[in-house]
Image (tube, coloured by chain):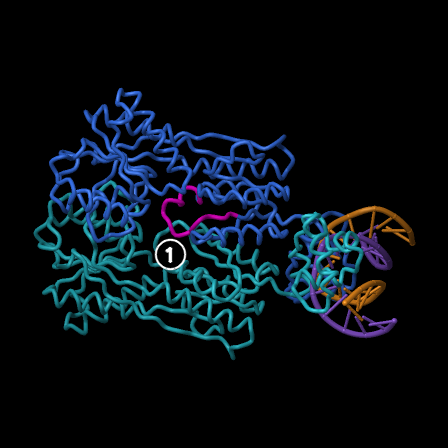
Chain colours: A cyan, B blue, C purple, D orange
Amino acid sequence: MASIKDVAKRAGCSVTLVSRVINHQPGVSEEKRQIIEAAIKELGYTQNMLARSLVLKKTNTIGVVLDTLCEEYFFPLIEGIEDQIDKSGYDVLFCSARNSTRKKNNYISYFMKNRVDGIIIYGSKLDDMDLIRRLVNAGFPFALIENDVGTLNANNILLNNEYGSALAVDHLFECGCRNICYVAGESTMQAAQRRQAGFVEAMKRHGISEKELLILDSGWTEEQGYGTFKNFLKKYGRKNLPDAFYFGSDQTAFGGMKALTEAGISVPDEVMLVGFDDDKPRHHDFSYMPLTTIRQPLEEMGRAAVDILLDELNGKSTGKKKVMYYPTLVVRETTR
Amino acid sequence: MASIKDVAKRAGCSVTLVSRVINHQPGVSEEKRQIIEAAIKELGYTQNMLARSLVLKKTNTIGVVLDTLCEEYFFPLIEGIEDQIDKSGYDVLFCSARNSTRKKNNYISYFMKNRVDGIIIYGSKLDDMDLIRRLVNAGFPFALIENDVGTLNANNILLNNEYGSALAVDHLFECGCRNICYVAGESTMQAAQRRQAGFVEAMKRHGISEKELLILDSGWTEEQGYGTFKNFLKKYGRKNLPDAFYFGSDQTAFGGMKALTEAGISVPDEVMLVGFDDDKPRHHDFSYMPLTTIRQPLEEMGRAAVDILLDELNGKSTGKKKVMYYPTLVVRETTR
DNA sequence: TTGTACGCGTTATCAC
DNA sequence: GTGATAACGCGTACAA
């Protein structure tokens, strides 16, 4: 609770000198410095960063808002951000919207009230647009990952989802599949729409006409995938199975895999599976087969977000930046 | 960038009134209120929380410092904390020490400089003690999870690791095992030491003498467990296998499981396995068998940390609190 | 109901 | 090398 004034009093000098000592600035005699340092120790003084940031108009902190902190999927992103921040001397604070747009808004407001210098936001939910506009209008520095804001003037780190779908479809064709069913995830996600569009496009390129296209509606979670496949199998049986399923998300794929296995259908012999996200199963009550999937370079994307944001904060950039990243194919057991 | 003064000027009134409107306080005519609210909108004014917290001496924020944000193991803890914080009206900020004591210290210092009202710290690393003492000496409100500071006057949320080992050993004896080998993890962790002590104690209770005890040294990671078992199997072959292995951590167990499976040893028929932590495999290039394990009530522990800390902050508590939680046995495939 | 003025803890400017 | 003092933006006695 001791303030800089208390230290000054104790050391018998002005606050100016104390401030210089604290901030390792020149202009203070060695003698005074020692007295002041002693006083700091004795009083257990710690700098009040609220006051400091108030006058400096700088917190030296970046805030990160994720949809959730409890998904392994975000690990590479978090690590990329941390790694790059570490090199910069800034501090980074994470908070979780717990998959609620309201909470996401709250935390962004929280950060915007002078608590951080800039914000990194991940999310491809379409209803985040209001919140993005707020940031843009306020002129608050931020970088947005995985949500294409189009012409809106904002730092944007994007993934080419269509390309990912092309990778998946091409790979399945190489594996001899032709009759491929796309299992769609949450349509409120921009990414989901693009993956589906990419699938359609890639299939057409392989000569499959639009009306031949198989698309199964499901959701992003394993439970939804499981339910979808239980129904599908009950309805169509195992005879009319396509050659392969391409899923909008790995979680959906895990659910599908479980339902297929329970029905005695052999993967990859009878049917091949490809997911998207390079994610891991949430549960561990079942022996999941290593899944072929499309991996996003999330770590690099996190790094890029930090770089772009810090460049803006330090006046090193001219205008907002938009960068596009490309996913890669990871071949595992489900397509061997 | 607009300040309260700008709003006052625009609205043609004093800052007092503006402040009251912002904070939803009474004592302002409906007429003025509307004018002020309009001015706020027009100027895009947002409260500067640095200044506000400075004068109120309160941030309404809790900081959480974890060893890492990138381990699924922490999910229940994080969720418990978030959940309980949500109910309280406080905000919560997470940061990751990235398994570095230095960084952990840095973030704790960061928070202590008036940036949050209280801190929640997880960690059972023994060399965290200096940092704990600093907090105690500074009189800064904090709650410590999973690190028994003994007589030190601090809020302490603990797990009974010895009891967990007793659960594991008892279960294995019920499964007909008698010749049980403990696979030890990182000895720099307090938890590791206690789990081993609990194992020894439980075995003695079952009439196994200390010199009959089998203890294998390994580490907390899957890789270490894998290496340990590769060596073990090379050295002793599969003939002299114990009835069961009890691991100080699930990760070690996954590594052991992989090595055993690769050696063609059948689990649980030839040897049974029990882990600790209720964790999941980091990798997914192998079909892991669902592992019997000891689960910690991490979500409740997170809730408790929040409750205890907030009670202290709001003057509802008398003195620091120490609470002990008990783990439970989760039976899965490796002991069936 | 409304306004003035001070203090929160810090840094920076300008004297000495 | 050293020390007043004015900001920073806010809340709040206190006075009107």
Can you say whether B152 is above or below A25 in the image?
Answer: above
Task: Give the residue type that dot 1 points to.
Answer: Phe
The reply, left or right, for residue C7 in relation to residue B74 is right
Can you say whether B126 is above or below B110 in the image?
Answer: above
Q: Nearer the viewer, residue B142 or A282?
A: B142
The spot of residue A41 in percent (x, y) is 67, 50
Mark 1 element type? helix
The spot of residue B203 in percent (x, y) is 29, 25
Q: Nearer the viewer, residue B191 or A107?
A: B191
Point out the stretch of residues depicted in magenta: B64-78
Please check the rendered image and state whether residue B213 is part of the magenta-colored stretch, yes or no: no
State which chain disc 1 sits on. A
- Any part of residue B282 in sight: yes
The structure residue drawn at horizontal position 24% and vertical position 52%, both measured from the top left corner, is B284
Can you say whether A38 is above or below B208 in the image?
Answer: below
The structure residue drawn at horizontal position 21% and vertical position 48%, both measured from the top left corner, is A288
The reply, left or right, for residue B307 in relation to residue A145 is right
Q: Nearer the viewer, residue A100 or A107?
A: A107
Image quadrant occupied by the N terminus of chain B: bottom right
The structure residue drawn at horizontal position 13% and vertical position 52%, both measured from the top left corner, is A267
Mark 1: few, some, or many residues within 10 Å (few <14, many ≥20)? many
Residue at the limit of the structure toward the bottom, as seen here: A318
